[in-house]
Amino acid sequence: MSLSTGIVGLPNVGKSTLFNAITNSSVEAANYPFATIEPNVGIVNVPDVRLTNLANLINPEKVVYNTFKFVDIAGLVKGASKGEGLGNKFLSNIREVDAICHVIRCFENTDITHVNSSVDPIRDLEIINLELIFSDIEVINNRLGRIGKKAQSRCKDSAFEKEVCEKILAALTNEKLANTVELNDKEKLVIKSYSLLTIKPIIYVANVSENDLNNLDANIHYKNLENKVGKENIIPLAIKLEQELSKIENYEEKKEFLKMMNLTEIGLDKLILKAYQILDLMTYFTYGKKEVRAWEFKKGMTAPECAGIIHSDFQRGFIKAEIIKYDDLMEYKSEDEVKKQGKMKLAGKDYIVEDGDICTFKFNV
């Protein structure tokens, strides 16, 4: 599916450092604006303990993780929607991704320059949001200009499109993101080609100091941001610490480092999974002695559609799917035992695949 998340924010908030940590690469992370001009692209494995457990059970020759794409987009500044700071180029880069990871600085450090001379997460959040909103307002107004005369005639499609545009424009002019507007499937289809920036799902990454990780309530910047965007939409990360952690290749050493820092999990793993989830992505598995593999699919896809992710012939000639639940295979340890317990399901063309299903597709072409 090759979906992607764009890392955005003001200059010098930790975007490139986060990108380096996620991808374990070393793009320039400088203490001045616009160190990144061309977007850097990195492909990362989606962490999944279920795949690890399946591999330990089956002991295959090969293990293949789902992958996800992150794009490091240069720092936006106030006036980007009018071309300030190479804004038009950067906004077009955001238009090409499927979701947004908005990095916001929530730590004090006089050695690291802030583009606005002080740390204020709410101000920084609103600067970026307003630039995205202004860009979308321009897109909607241009579209309304094109369909205006058609909508006044008896063209039902144009009249409907005009209604949808005006509905979104009303939110944008009130400084609300398009993704806050309730739209039905038909309305979503109408605006799909617009590539609106604020219709994309957003994760907010609060870049905090490592000392704050175990006491976030004491960080007033973080608490202000949490109150603004909601706890479920924000991931606190000490990005510099995560970069150091990403350089440790040995798993046991990494665990020891986490323990030393009083942390129970890798923050980047939470971010990658969150990016995966906000795009309604799920995982099914296939397995055998040669390969155990995770496959990403969109929530709501049927068994034939999921089969088609492997190969179009699987979908075209789909007969049925044998479905084993991950928990059942972990409990009974073998496919034969799962069958004996009556836990294998034969699924037809209408079956909606669920997250964690282990699938064997039967087809004939």
Image (cartoon, rainbow, N blue to C red):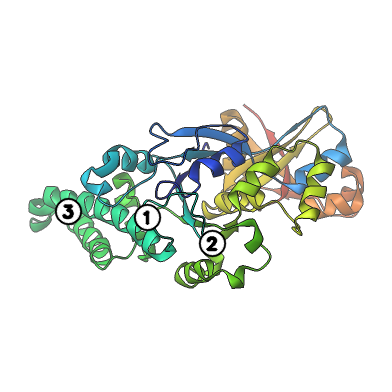
Residue at horizontal 24%, vertical 55%?
A: 134
Which is more N-terminal, label 2 or label 1?
1
Q: Nearer the viewer, residue 86 or 33?
A: 33
Q: Nearer the viewer, residue 328 or 74?
A: 74
Kind of element beneath mark 1: loop
Q: Nearer the viewer, mark 3 or mark 2?
A: 2
Kind of residue at disc 1: Ile
Q: Mark 2 packing: few (<14 Cα in 10 Å), some, or many (20+)?
A: many
Query: Relative to residue 194, is residue 130 depicted above or below?
Result: below
Query: Relative to residue 288, is residue 244 depicted above or below?
Result: below
| Tag 1–tag 3 contact (CB < 8 Å) | no
The residue under label 2 is 234
C-alpha separation, residue under disc 1 versus residue under disc 2: 18 Å
Q: Position of residue 239 (x, y in %)?
A: 59, 49
The residue under label 3 is 141
Quarter of the image for the C terminus: give it.
top right
Taking the image as drawn, is residue 209 in sight? yes
Kind of element beneath mark 3: helix
Taking the image as drawn, is residue 3 in sight? no
Kind of residue at disc 3: Asn
Q: Nearer the viewer, mark 1 or mark 2?
A: 2
Q: Position of residue 181 (x, y in %)?
A: 35, 65
Locate residue 351 relative to residue 278 in the image: left or right.
right
C-alpha separation, residue under disc 1 versus residue under disc 3: 16 Å
The residue under label 1 is 199
Which is more N-terminal, label 2 or label 3?
3
